[in-house]
Amino acid sequence: MKIDIISIFPEVFEPVFSVGMSRLAQERGLIDINAHDLRDFTEDKHRQVDDEPYGGGPGMIMKPEPFFAALKSLVGESPFVLSGGHRTILLTPQGKKLNQKMLSEFSRAKHLVVLCGRYEGVDARVGTFVTDEVSLGDYVLSGGEIGAMVLVDSVGRLISGVLGGEASLDEESFSNGLLEYPQYTRPASWLGFEVPPVLTSGDHKAIREWRAARARFMTQTKRPDLLEERETDL
Ligand code: ADE
């Protein structure tokens, strides 16, 4: 998968994606992540990416043309009428709240272009030429860069071949709408806390059943909202 990120701070991505899973996935040729400077897509001498809001008000608004030019250059066609395979994603607090289901959909694209806003906001017309608007949650960040890191990291690990054991994806939190069951490693006894005996019993059927019951219980007690969502999805 090809992933392009458009930002006025492209340098912040390098240290994040040059370690761990992202690094390995890039070295294996499974993903290709590139961050681009939005200012490279301006045409004026000052490389201006923002301007005052029409109607007045505080702060500056990011102009639509540099984003449009960047997208056009990166997808090689009009951002308004994209052929399949491309997803163009604007990070904004007004977008749809990111969840594992959306990530799974994004992970099937051939090409993701992630647009990061800054300042007080982005000209509303940018929303007319992206395929998706995504929010990290109901709070305001100072820009889309951290959101882009979250998105790229969590999509990257869903791409086939990126993680060693693909089975771990089926077991992990949210993949089936539930939190993951509790996990333990050695030592079996620590500060008087014991690992549940079923996990050391060697009885695989009992372990499976215990995990399924615990996943449901943990979700019920910690995130009952997920169970409600799951009912509506089934
Ligand atoms: N930019 C500013 N706030 C944001 C949020 N909550 N999600 C995504 N992008 C943002």
Image (spheres, rainbow, N blue to C red):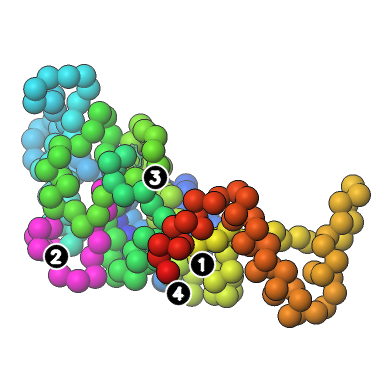
Instruction: Give the extent of the magenta segment.
Output: 76-90
Query: The disc labelled 4 sits on which kind of residue?
Result: Ser
What percent of the width, then of the height, locates residue 151? 40, 53
Query: Which residue is at 46% across, 62% downward?
Result: 230
Query: The disc labelled 1 sits on which kind of residue?
Result: Asn
Instruction: Please identify the quadrant where the C terminus is shown.
Output: bottom left
Q: Is residue 85 above or below residue 179?
A: below
What percent of the width, then of the height, locates residue 123? 15, 37
Q: Is mark 1 within 8 Å of ligand 1?
A: no
Q: Is there CB contact under 8 Å for labels 4 and 1?
A: no
Q: Which residue is mark 4?
A: 160
For the residue pair 171 and 17, the one nearer the viewer reads as 171
Q: Is residue 121 above or below residue 126?
A: above
Picture quadrant where residue 47 is located: top left
Q: Which residue is mark 1?
A: 176
Q: Is mark 3 within 8 Å of ligand 1?
A: yes
Q: Nearer the viewer, mark 3 or mark 1?
A: 1
Picture quadrant where residue 168 is located: bottom right
Q: Is residue 134 magenta?
A: no
How far apart are the alpha carbons under marks 3 and 1?
Answer: 20 Å
Q: Callout 4 environment at 10 Å: few (<14), some (14 to 19), or many (20+)?
A: few
Query: Which residue is at 86% across, 51% downward?
Result: 193
Q: Which residue is mark 2?
A: 82
Q: Which residue is mark 3?
A: 136
